[in-house]
Image (cartoon, helix red, strand yellow):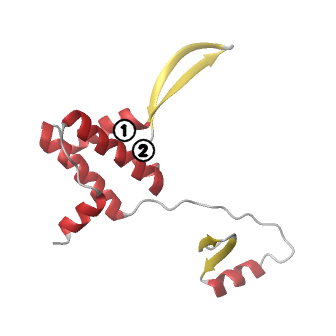
């Protein structure tokens, strides 16, 4: 099994590297196979920015970045799991997703919620990812 990067442009799938992709597809001549579409995971740079955001919250409050990490996961990623037996709800349990499970789009949305929270509740400004990158490249 091989992995390839593809992009859809105007309904046409462009795969890279094209020659190797064709070679792999030829192996399945006359057979059925599955193509799975995966969203890109977040980058190391995105992860560094996330922890910098948590650092701003930490500096403003005295709580550690790890404490903010756990608090924001509970606040923004928690799901309510309802325990139903015989059609009757008997309990409700909180469960939160790992930030590592978030794709790039969901992770950006999650960070925007943290930035909004910091602005509205903590009354601090967290730089955008572009501002952060500009600052560390100085």
**Numbered disc 1: secondary structure:** helix
User: Residue 122: which quarter of the image?
Assistant: top left
Q: Earlier in the sequence, mark 2 or mark 1?
A: 1
Q: Residue at 34% of width from left, 60% of height from top?
A: 46
User: Is 41 on the left-hand or right-hand side of 24?
Assistant: left
Residue 4 shows which numbered tag?
A: none
Furthest residue toward right? 30
In this picture, is 110 found above or below 83? below
Label 2, label 1: how many angstroms apart (C-alpha)? 7 Å
User: Is 86 on the left-hand or right-hand side of 93?
Assistant: right
Judge depth for marks 2 and 1 and give the one in front. 1
Q: Residue at 70% of width from left, 79% of height from top?
A: 24
- Look at the numbered discs 2 and 1 and tell me whether their residues touch, using CB distance below 8 Å: yes
The image position of residue 22, as x and y in percent, is: 71, 83
In this picture, is 12 found above or below 53? below
**Numbered disc 2: secondary structure:** loop
Q: Is residue 70 visible?
A: yes
Q: Is residue 103 visible?
A: no
The image position of residue 48, as x and y in percent, is: 28, 59
Q: Nearer the viewer, residue 81 or 123?
A: 123
The image position of residue 74, as x and y in percent, is: 37, 33
Q: Nearer the viewer, residue 36 or 6?
A: 6
Quadrant including the C terminus: bottom left
Crowding at label 1, few (<14), some or many (≥20) Cα neighbours within 10 Å? some
The image position of residue 114, as x and y in percent, is: 31, 43
Q: Residue at 63% of width from left, 61% of height from top?
A: 37
Please tell me how many numbered marks the rendered image carries: 2
Q: Which residue is mark 1?
A: 73
């Amino acid at each position: 099994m091989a992995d390839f990067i593809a992009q859809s442009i105007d309904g046409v799938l462009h795969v890279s590297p094209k020659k190797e992709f064709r070679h792999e597809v030829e192996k399945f001549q006359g057979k059925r196979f599955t193509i799975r579409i995966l969203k890109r995971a977040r980058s190391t740079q995105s992860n560094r920015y996330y922890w910098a955001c948590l650092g701003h919250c930490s500096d403003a409050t005295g709580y550690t970045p790890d404490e903010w990490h756990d608090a924001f996961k509970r606040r923004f990623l928690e799901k309510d799991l309802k325990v139903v037996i015989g059609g009757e709800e008997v309990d409700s349990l909180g469960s939160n997703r790992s930030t590592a499970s978030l794709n790039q789009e969901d992770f950006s949305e999650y960070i925007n919620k943290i930035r909004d929270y910091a602005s509205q509740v903590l009354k601090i400004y967290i730089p955008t990812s572009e501002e952060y990158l500009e600052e560390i490249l100085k």
